[in-house]
Image: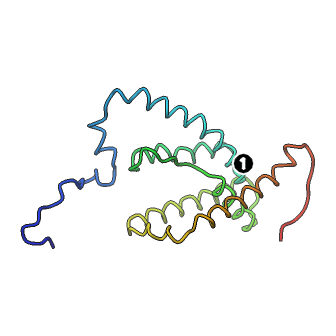
Amino acid sequence: MAAEGAQPNTNEPGGIARFVPILQWASQYDRQWLRPDLIAGLTVTALVVPKALGYAEIAGVPIVYGLYAAAGAIVYALFGTSGQISTGPSSALAAVAAGAVIAAGVFGAEDTVALVAAIALVTGLLFLLVALLKMDWISQFLSKAVITGFLFGAAIEVVIGELPKITGTSATGASA
């Protein structure tokens, strides 16, 4: 309930524009920005596509699914609010997905794809729930050191796993 005499906030978008930010700024888009924006988009695509293909291989799914994961940037352009953020698959997510596939004992391309897709969908739904409940403050409890350590450990695991392919040797072993 608003205080008596209080003015409503006219800066807040209403209707569907509240959930689809592109509807707010598209009408004010300066056409002079189109060429640099297209160049930036092509540059990011040239970087993201090979990376996404590699992450799909790490996750244990056919590499074409990496392209589907990279399409998240297009969706973010419609629903996101930052022009400077990069979205898409990451090495940490690929390592986690591969770990889940191994832990579940899933073998075969179809079952692996189904499990990784289910993980992605559930994760997306959880992100939406966190956003709707305005619970982004939870991320403050994850220190930079913990995140860096996790990513470093995942990188070491990926590098060690890929070394036999790079060197043309074979390796066997088990992890505890």
- The percent position of residue 31, horizontal first and vertical second, equals 33, 28
> Quarter-wise, where is residue 70 in the image?
top right
Q: Which residue is mark 1?
A: 57
Q: Left or right: 112 with respect to 74?
A: right
In the rendered image, the vertical position of residue 128 relative to residue 85, given as above or below: below
Q: Is residue 124 above or below residue 85?
A: below
Q: Residue furthest left?
A: 5
**Dividing the image into 4 quarters, which one contains the N terminus?**
bottom left
Q: Residue drawn at (67%, 59%), measured in percent from left and top? A: 151
Q: In the image, 104: left or right of 47?
A: right
Picture quadrant of residue 54: top right
Relative depth, front residue between 176 and 43 = 43
Residue 136, above or below 15 = below
Tell me residue 133's x, y (percent).
38, 69
> Whole-percent x and y of residue 32?
35, 26
* Of residues 164 and 138, the one drawn nearer to the viewer in this rendering: 138
Q: Is residue 31 left or right of residue 43?
A: left
Nearest the eye: 145 or 119: 145
